[in-house]
């Protein structure tokens, strides 16, 4: 239930807005604390100059709650600073010759990413293309929110702890029928979409060709692969990027040293004075995990133990560092605004792997990046910050005192939290051989789940997330 004082602030602000009285008056008269000022301002300030969209892959309500509980129940997360919250449905659609398409209630990251990137439902595995009769039949390319910001002259950025060609970062700046066609060496299933066949090429090629101002993450091997055909045949995607004036870095020190040269005057044709885009690829695959800890086991699981923190190698920048640098590069000498997507990717990947400490550590690191975005928003109130997940996942918080026939039937991990209590997580969406069978010894990749996911927002346009909506509705919100 909404606190009474905030309810009064909302009612008063609506009344003042309806009579044409400025937002500043409403805030000053009726909003005695920061949260209430943010809510009141959102009622009349709806058009952001900048948008920062943060996506915790697989970060459903259980995942964010596990991170909150592990850190200590009385220690709020950064995401708790966001006053406006809602829920989104995430269902995708199944193949068909034409609409209407049957719903698929348990989506993947490609279809859900396409939803907020384009405002359109599509098939699982598909990257910013519409649905079609079969997964191996490409759909129509759909304009993305990043492309719309670029058309307005804004700068754009894309940051992930996964390969930067993975599904979530890919949906902004590529169009392809299958998410696995990430680099020039991966195009076997997308042969008709190769550049040599008249297509747009692999995801890596498209991201560079889109001239995204800031591209930061893992996946270097996709970009060092040789392009077999098209204008850059015989060269790597890195070569193609550098031909298109990208600054290329491969470690934390290189990223820290990158500077933005600033815009050239309108009358100056010296292109070297343009802001040069940045390509940062810090690992060959996905970026390293922040935390490690005990392995999951069937039934009761392990004796309680804490996670081991600070496991990321020093040569890899943290997600918070990449977020801070991306904001700085996009914001410097920029009067036209920017759009930035930040993905905490391995929450999902460690949920699949039943790795509780890996999952929680990535969630905490993602929340630290949220803090960076919110600190920027506080001093730049014309910025909208939105946080959500693409889909829900398998981990569940269960009773630590279960025994006998009450034991979980999946894979469990028991962690000693910073409160000194036991947090028990269980994973049970994969691992059985059939009806009545026992779990297999080694946990297989767990399945996503079809639950609604939370959405948080702060800044101009943030009221749009209130209530229960669909992921496709985020497209209009992020479009500013």
Image (tube, rainbow, N blue to C red):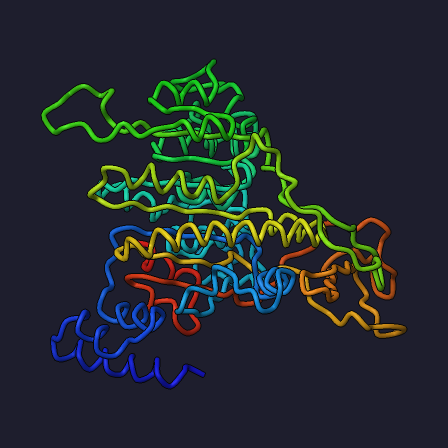
Question: x, y (%) of residue 118?
Answer: 37, 52
Tell me: residue 22, above or below residue 346: below
* Along the line of sight, the residue nearer the viewer: 157 or 393: 157
Q: Quadrant of the C terminus?
A: bottom left
Q: Is residue 330 above or below residue 145?
A: above
Q: Residue at x 87, y 61 (%)?
A: 437
In the displayed image of the protein, which residue is found farthest to the top? 234
Most foreground residue, 193 or 417: 417
Q: Is 135 situated left or right of 247 in this image?
A: right
Residue 40: percent from the left, percent from the top? 28, 72
Q: Quadrant of residue 140?
A: top left
Q: Is residue 65 left or right of residue 217?
A: right
Residue at the spot x=45%, y=63% of the render? 100
Q: Quadrant of the N terminus?
A: bottom left
Residue 152, image x, y percentages:
22, 44
Residue 44's quadrant in the figure? bottom left
Residue at the left extreme, as displayed: 267
Along the horizontal axis of the image, is 139 left or right of 283? Answer: left
Q: Residue at x 15, y 20 (%)?
A: 269
Residue sitting farthest toward the right: 404
**Among the 4 quarters of the image, the one containing residue 17:** bottom left
Residue at left 85%, top 53%? Answer: 440
């Amino acid at each position: 239930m909404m606190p009474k004082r905030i309810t009064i602030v909302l009612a008063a602000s609506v009344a003042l807005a309806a009579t044409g009285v400025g937002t500043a008056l409403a805030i000053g008269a009726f909003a005695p604390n920061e949260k209430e000022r943010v809510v009141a301002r959102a009622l009349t300030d709806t058009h952001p100059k900048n948008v920062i969209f943060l996506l915790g892959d697989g970060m459903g309500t259980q995942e964010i709650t596990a991170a909150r509980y592990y850190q200590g129940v009385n220690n709020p997360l950064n995401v708790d600073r966001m006053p406006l919250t809602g829920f989104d449905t995430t269902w995708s659609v199944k193949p068909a010759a034409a609409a209407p398409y049957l719903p698929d209630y348990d989506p993947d990251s490609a279809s859900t990413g396409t939803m907020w990137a384009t405002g359109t439902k599509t098939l699982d595995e598909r990257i910013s293309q519409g649905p079609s009769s079969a997964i191996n039949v490409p759909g129509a390319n759909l304009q993305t929110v990043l492309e719309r910001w670029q058309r307005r002259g804004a700068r754009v950025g894309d940051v992930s702890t996964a390969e930067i060609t993975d599904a979530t970062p890919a949906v902004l700046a590529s169009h392809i029928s299958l998410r696995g066609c990430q680099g020039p060496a991966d195009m076997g299933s997308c042969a008709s979409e190769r550049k040599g066949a008249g297509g747009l090429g692999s995801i890596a090629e498209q991201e560079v060709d889109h001239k995204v101002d800031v591209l930061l993450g893992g996946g270097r091997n996709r970009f060092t692969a040789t392009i077999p055909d098209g204008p850059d045949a015989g060269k790597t995607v890195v070569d193609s990027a550098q031909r298109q004036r990208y600054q290329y870095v491969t470690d934390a020190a290189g990223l820290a040293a990158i500077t933005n040269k600033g815009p050239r005057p309108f009358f100056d044709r010296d292109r070297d004075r343009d802001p040069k885009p940045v390509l940062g690829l810090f690992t060959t695959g996905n970026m390293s995990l922040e935390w490690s800890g005990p392995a999951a086991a069937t039934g009761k699981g392990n004796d309680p133990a804490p996670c081991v923190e600070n496991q990321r190698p020093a040569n890899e920048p943290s997600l918070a560092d990449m977020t801070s640098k991306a904001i700085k590069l996009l914001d410097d000498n920029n009067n036209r605004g920017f759009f930035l997507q930040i993905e905490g990717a391995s929450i999902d990947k460690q949920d699949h792997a039943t790795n509780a400490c890996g999952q929680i550590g990535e969630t905490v690191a993602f929340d630290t990046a949220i803090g960076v975005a919110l600190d920027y928003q506080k001093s730049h109130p014309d910025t909208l910050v939105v946080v959500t997940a693409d889909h829900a996942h398998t981990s569940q918080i269960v009773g630590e005192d279960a025994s006998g026939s009450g034991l979980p039937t999946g894979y469990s991990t028991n962690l000693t939290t910073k409160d000194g209590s036991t947090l028990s997580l269980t994973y049970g969406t994969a691992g059985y051989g059939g009806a009545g069978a026992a779990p297999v010894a080694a946990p297989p990749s767990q399945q996503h789940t079809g639950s609604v996911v939370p959405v948080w927002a702060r800044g101009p346009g943030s009221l749009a997330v209130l209530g229960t909506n669909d992921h496709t509705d985020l497209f209009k919100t992020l479009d500013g």
